[in-house]
């Protein structure tokens, strides 16, 4: 979603705002859906109906688009001791956690994945949400889940990682965190400008909306919401260590975040001996923390050069983003390189990955997905 947000902001300052086409996708809905229902079943039912009524559909399979953007719950066969609430990133959807959620439910977890207000319908709906909405929906559904389980965990991807970490600092019911590419330290020097920019210009970036699980376009309001989440989580991290178990994953070549700063933060701010940091890339120099696991992100036998911001979440078998999935993120910051006609000549990597005579699409699945599940079990199971 962000790709190179610093470049977009700089271009905006040097030029002018992006002007959207005359399309429902770039006009906000009349209002956001309610999210503080008395039970999760009602929340899912009402949110699904709201998405059906308000979504600017992209393709012909409307039911699939609704399904991939609706909050969901997966219950294990037996009563659950552990429960986890999962929170997606900016522009993404609850479905981003479907592979992890399914595996954890098979391990006996009660798993819920929520929809952040402003998502699931059209990019312009990010103009309607604020950080209070995001904080309130997490607090409400964390409380609902805590009633049903003995141990409450929170999980988040990217911006969702910021939000659940900040909530965990205030909620003693939270027993641990699973953080996938958490957006603590963005790779941009201009993010602080986004709240001011959002008062004057509506859009930072406008793209073709061809991905049914993710917004491709970014309103300035959305970038401002991300900035607020960064500011809050950084203040929390400075104020105190988080001493409960945490699993954190990071790609060395993440195009959105400063990976080395994330690793340093893990070592300094998350002291629990059970915590683990999974680093996808080359082993960092002078690393002597036994809690850090390094896995190579250069896998030429699978035409993978680097890992991306998002790929950790998805199993290779995923029907949409997987190794043989129906959607390929061809747009990857390589406009000067022709796209290969033969799929066998396509390589995969982080946004902006560039090598001579290789066209890189975005890597959208995790070759180490089975190992990731083992990492989760190691951290989150007694």
Image (cartoon, rainbow, N blue to C red):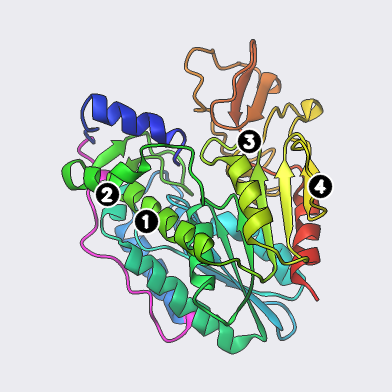
Residue 380 colored in magenta in the image = no
User: Where is residue 14 shown, x and y percent of the image?
Assistant: 25, 24
Which residue position holds label 1? Answer: 228
- Dot 2 falls on a residue whose secondary structure is helix
Front position among marks 2 and 4:
4
The residue carrying pointer 4 sits among few (fewer than 14), some (14 to 19) or many (20 or more) residues within 10 Å by Cα, namely: few
The mark nearer the N terminus, 2 or 4, is 2
Which residue position holds label 3? Answer: 363
Q: CA distance from mark 3 to mark 2?
A: 31 Å
Residue 188 vs 168, above or below: the answer is above
Residue drawn at point x = 36 percent, y = 63 percent: 117
Q: Nearer the viewer, residue 274 or 251?
A: 274
Front position among marks 3 and 2:
2
> Would you identify the image quadrant in which residue 6 lies?
top left
The residue carrying pointer 2 sits among few (fewer than 14), some (14 to 19) or many (20 or more) residues within 10 Å by Cα, namely: some
- Dot 4 falls on a residue whose secondary structure is loop
> Would you identify the image quadrant in which residue 189 lies?
top left
- Magenta extent: 21-41
User: Where is residue 285 shown, x and y percent of the image?
Assistant: 76, 35
Mark 3 and mark 1 residues within 8 Å of each other at the beta carbon: no
Residue 224 vs 232, above or below: the answer is above
Q: Is residue 251 visible?
A: yes
The mark nearer the N terminus, 2 or 1, is 2
Which residue position holds label 4? Answer: 288
Task: Please tell me the numbered disc located at residue 195.
Answer: 2
Q: CA distance from mark 3 to mark 1?
A: 28 Å
The mark nearer the N terminus, 3 or 4, is 4
Residue lying at the far bottom of the rendered structure: 147
């Amino acid at each position: 979603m962000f790709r190179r947000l610093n470049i977009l902001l700089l271009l905006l300052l040097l030029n002018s705002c992006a002007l959207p086409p005359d399309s429902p996708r770039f006009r906000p809905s009349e209002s956001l859906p309610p999210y503080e229902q008395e039970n999760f079943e009602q929340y899912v039912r009402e949110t699904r109906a709201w998405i059906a009524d308000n979504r600017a559909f992209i393709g012909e399979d409307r039911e699939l688009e609704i399904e991939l953007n609706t909050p969901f719950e997966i219950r294990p066969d037996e009563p659950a001791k552990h429960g986890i609430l999962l929170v997606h990133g900016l522009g993404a959807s609850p479905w981003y956690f479907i592979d992890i959620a399914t595996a954890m439910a098979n391990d006996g977890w009660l798993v819920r994945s929520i929809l952040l207000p402003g998502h699931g319908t059209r990019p312009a709906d990010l103009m309607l949400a604020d950080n209070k909405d995001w904080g309130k929906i997490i607090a409400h559904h964390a409380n609902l889940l805590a009633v049903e389980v003995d141990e409450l965990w929170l999980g988040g991807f990217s911006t969702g990682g910021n939000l659940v970490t900040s909530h965990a600092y205030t909620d003693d019911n939270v027993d641990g965190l699973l953080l996938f590419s958490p957006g603590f330290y963005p790779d941009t020097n201009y993010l602080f400008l986004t709240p001011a920019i959002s008062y004057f210009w509506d859009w930072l970036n406008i793209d073709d909306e061809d991905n049914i699980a993710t917004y491709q376009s970014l309103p300035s309001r959305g970038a401002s919401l991300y900035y607020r989440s960064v500011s809050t989580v950084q203040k929390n991290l400075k104020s105190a260590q988080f001493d409960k178990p945490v699993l954190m994953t990071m790609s060395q070549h993440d195009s959105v975040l400063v990976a080395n700063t994330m690793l340093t933060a893990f070592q300094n701010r998350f002291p629990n001996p059970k915590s683990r940091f999974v680093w996808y890339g080359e082993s960092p120099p002078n690393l002597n923390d036994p809690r850090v696991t390094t896995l190579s992100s250069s896998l030429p036998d699978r035409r993978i050069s680097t890992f991306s911001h998002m790929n950790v979440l998805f199993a290779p078998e995923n029907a949409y983003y997987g190794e043989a999935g129906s959607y390929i993120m061809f747009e990857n910051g390589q406009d000067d390189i022709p796209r290969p006609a033969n799929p066998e000549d396509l390589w995969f990597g982080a946004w902006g990955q560039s090598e001579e005579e290789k066209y890189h699409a975005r890597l959208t699945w995790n070759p180490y997905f089975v190992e990731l599940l083992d990492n989760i079990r190691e951290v989150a199971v007694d």
